[in-house]
Amino acid sequence: MSEGGLLELPVDWVSLALASAVFPLHLSIDPRVGWVSYALYWAAYIRTVQLVQTTMMSPPSRFLLPIEPEDWVGDLESPWEVFSDKWSRKRLASVGFPNGNLVICGSSRSGQDFLSLAFVHKSGFVQDPFHERTSMEPGLSEFLAKPLPIVGREWPTPLLPISEEE
């Protein structure tokens, strides 16, 4: 769900750009400069793996609330930014945080409409907003402790898991 494009991905762009800038210098200065470039590429690779690992430490998860489309009226208070007053299958509202956004989206499955709540990291990775690593986001836990003025419906019977023990 990255909206910022390629540069928002968890890549060590600084080391990668530096290595790419140093690489052609081995042709005009000294072939040993190529080894410096090679080391910088490895540093960029290792750092990128660490950034991706850190980003993916929180599990991807969305929380669903069954609703009727007319239940969504978009009357959320500040700091929520409401994008649509009518329910649809898209981003309906969001709140910005330093490392991403808490997002409410419309979703459908098996003829049932839902609101989904997720934390979208600035890299575009969808994360569980209630996971301990995501909850370290400054202000997110406090914000999630406040109730939302959204009324849900009963979970649809066809989507309930059937226990084989019964």
Image (tube, rainbow, N blue to C red):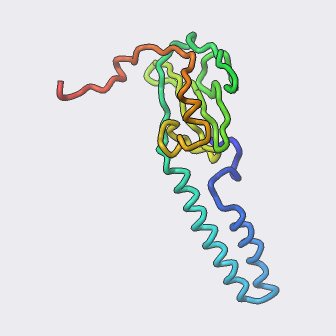
Asked if residue 65 lies left or right of residue 137, the reply is left
Q: Position of residue 147 (x, y in %)?
A: 54, 21
As drawn, 37 above or below 74: below
Front position in the image: 137 or 160 = 137
The spot of residue 123 in percent (x, y) is 63, 47
Q: Residue at x 55, y 16 (%)?
A: 150
Residue depicted at 58% across the width and 24% down the height = 89
Q: Residue 76, percent across and down?
A: 65, 19
> Can you see residue 159?
yes
> In the rendered image of this protein, does residue 71 appear above or below residue 126?
above
* Image point (49%, 33%), residue name: 62
Tell which residue pokes out farthest to the right in this image. Answer: 28
**Image quarter of the C terminus:** top left
Residue 45 rendering spot, x and y as whole percentages: 60, 67
Residue that sits furthest to the left in the current view: 165
Position of residue 83 relative to residue 10, above or below, is above
Residue sitting at the far top: 70
Q: Quadrant of the N terminus?
A: top right
| x 63%, y 28%: residue | 91
